[in-house]
Amino acid sequence: MTTIENESSAKARTESAGEGRGASVIVNVIDVLRCFTVDRSLVGVTEIAAEVGLHKSSVSRILATLEQERIVERDEQSRKYKLGLGLIAITGPLLANLDVRQVAYPLLKELRDSTDESAALTIWDGGESVTVEQIPSTRLVKHTSVMGSRYRTALSATVQVFLSAQPHELVRGLLDSGKIELPQVMAPEDYLTRLEVAQRRGYAFNYGETSRDEVGVAAPVYDHRGEVIASVMVAAPYYRISSEDLERLCTEVVRTARRISARLGYQDNS
């Protein structure tokens, strides 16, 4: 093998390694962010470049982009970088959801046991209610949803709960855009009135309105700031839920949602 061939092979190996590890911009960005730790909150370009194995110019470009998005900030005195408040906007919902799931799980189990129906926890994702936890009923016939299931039907109990906490203008925008599906037989004004009622009484229900086979009852979960961050729901087959049973489910769901809220630091001063 000639010298030229040796050099060519070495170059190919280097390029191949680069494609396998360093070619991904996302991987590089993650590596840069991992350089910031609790013990080392301020890090310079040179330090990061040495740690992640990138050229300083590449690290500088990554940091410049992250700074534009407020993911990192430049410390004026040291000229080094630190994590920025923009990162909270990204990780905040995840941290809150992990917290509420952990707190809610044992209480959801109690709710399932007291009602003998499926109990679930959902969160709001801008225009959809998303199932993030569920304790299925032990009965043979039951209503369950797959983790990660999304709901945007206006009469869904959880959708009502989340939208009842939103300004009317935002709700109208979601309805007008079709992101929230409102039955043609119901006028937007009537739906907004329904949301006001749900907010006053502290729960919402779907009594066979989105599906003739299902009943859903939901109540809001508040965090320590008094903001609705989740919804507790019970789902049951329509055929076995009388009006008296519906009232009992509403009471149980509200009680569970309040207990979860209290454990999250919410203080009800009403």
Image (cartoon, rainbow, N blue to C red):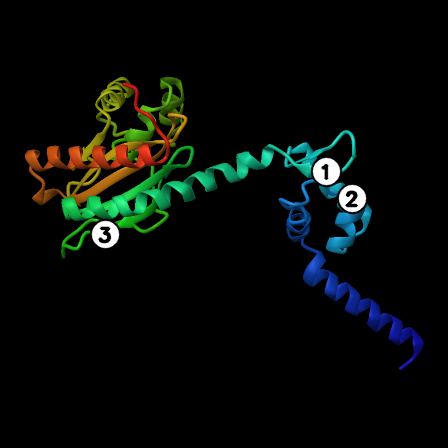
Q: Amino acid under label 2?
A: Val
Q: Which mark is residue 45?
A: 2
Seen in the image, is 104 located left or right of residue 93?
A: left
In which quadrant of the rendered image does the N terminus lie?
bottom right
N-terminal of the two: label 3 or label 1? Answer: 1
Q: Is residue 225 above or below residue 106?
A: above
Query: Disc 3 designates what residue?
Result: 136
Which residue is pictured at 16% across the width and 33% down the height? 251
Q: Is residue 39 above or below residue 156?
A: below
Which residue is pictured at 12% across the width and 35% down the height? 248
Q: Are marks 1 and 2 in contact (CB under 8 Å)?
A: yes
Which residue is pictured at 73% across the width and 43% down the height? 43
Please identify the quarter of the rendering in which residue 229 is found: top left
N-terminal of the two: label 1 or label 2? Answer: 2
Which residue is pictured at 47% across the width and 41% down the height? 95
Instruction: Name the element at disc 3.
Output: loop
Distance between mark 3 and mark 1 Cα atoms: 47 Å
Instruction: Name the element at disc 2.
Output: helix
Please identify the quarter of the rendering in which residue 111 is found: top left
Instruction: Name the element at disc 1.
Output: strand
Q: Which mark is residue 81?
A: 1
Q: Which mark is residue 101?
A: none
Distance between mark 2 and mark 3 Cα atoms: 51 Å
**Which of 177/240 is in front?**
240
Q: Are marks 2 and 3 in contact (CB under 8 Å)?
A: no
Bin the neighbour count of mark 2 within 10 Å (Cα to Cα): few under 14, some 14-19, many 20 and up: some
**Which of 227/268 is in front?**
268
Q: Amino acid under label 1?
A: Tyr
